[in-house]
Image: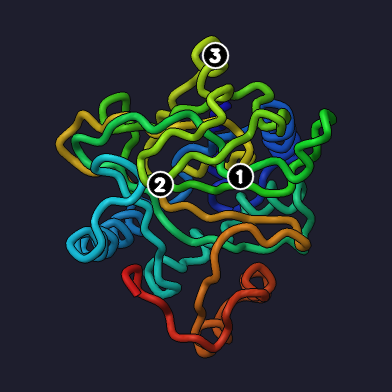
Amino acid sequence: MHIKLTQEELSTGVLKKETLDIAVEQIQVNGYVVFERVLSDELISEIRESFNALFDEYIERKGYNTGTNRAQMFLPFAKPYISKDVIAHPIAMSVIDQILGNDCRCTYFASDTPMPGSDYQAVHCDLNSLFPELSVPLPSFSLVLNIPLVDTTEENGPLEIWPGGTHLHGDWAVHDTLNGSVNPHLHIVRAAEHMHSEKVIMPAGSIVIRDIRMWHRGTPNRSNERRTNIALIYNRSWYCYGSSIQIPQETYDQLSQKEKELFRFEKIGSPAKLPWE
């Protein structure tokens, strides 16, 4: 579901109760929600310019890692990437806190970029079920937040998702592989062929929040330009799926109280890590 926020909601960073209730309900029942045009064009432009230079160097050093002409790249915990509107936007956090609790944590800070010539990924979800022996669906415990740095269109490799309850069926949840091999658990791929899917088309600076268990895949980028999403993962306080984020002490000290709480379990006092390190 796409939600266009009012000017008052955008300027204050506070959702109307009805909007908040709808957003939470959509994630819990349908698996995701999109808020359109939340971040300013100026901030997105600044991040995109910095990111493109960093990504080019990363590809030169490390190459692609999530498929043909497609790469996941971790981001350094440094400006301009750590703007509060990226790591702890009040609109996003009001929804995330409602679902995961206000003591939730952020454990992943990265990006996904399909370049021109990228191909389909296999349909997958990003983690296996906590309790695969159970047939009872579990509440959300981990949410992905994506921010596109360019307008996402049919042509430039939009994320394709399977909404409407795929995130509730943990017995079908399997990882995609990063080396191009096919996961032996093909039931998720086979089932997806006969189910409704949607491509997440949205303008740059939008915010997507989705249950990490939702089935999805990357699609081919048939344009002439890269299509980058920033990606963060927020978890319930007791769950630590993600990666270790290195945060210099001085940087951490300058964060807001909410931001400090989100990253409290990461490597505080370590130098910001470049993607190829």
Closer to the chain start, of discs 3 and 1, is 1
Rendered residue at 53%/25% (across/down): 186
Compared across the picture, whether 17 is left or right of 187 comes to right
Report the number of discs: 3
Q: Which residue is mark 1?
A: 127
For the C terminus, the quadrant is bottom left
The amino acid on which the numbered mark 2 sits, given as a three-letter code, is Leu
Q: CA distance from mark 3 to mark 1?
A: 21 Å
The amino acid on which the numbered mark 1 sits, given as a three-letter code, is Leu
Up-down relation of residue 110 to residue 177 (above or below): below
Labels 2, 3: front one: 2
Up-down relation of residue 252 to residue 2 (above or below): below
Looking at the picture, tell me which residue is in the foreground, 222 or 50. Answer: 222
Q: For mark 1, does the 10 Å Cα neighbourhood hold few (<14), some (14 to 19), or many (20 or more) residues? A: some
Rendered residue at 19%/41% (across/down): 225
Q: Which residue is mark 2?
A: 178
Q: Secondary structure at mark 2?
A: loop
The amino acid on which the numbered mark 3 sits, given as a three-letter code, is His
Q: Which residue is mark 3?
A: 196
Looking at the picture, tell me which residue is in the foreground, 134 or 239. Answer: 134
Rendered residue at 15%/36% (across/down): 224
Closer to the chain start, of discs 2 and 3, is 2
Q: CA distance from mark 1 to mark 2?
A: 13 Å
Residue at the farthest front position: 184
Using the image, tell me which numbered label, if any, was put on residue 210: none
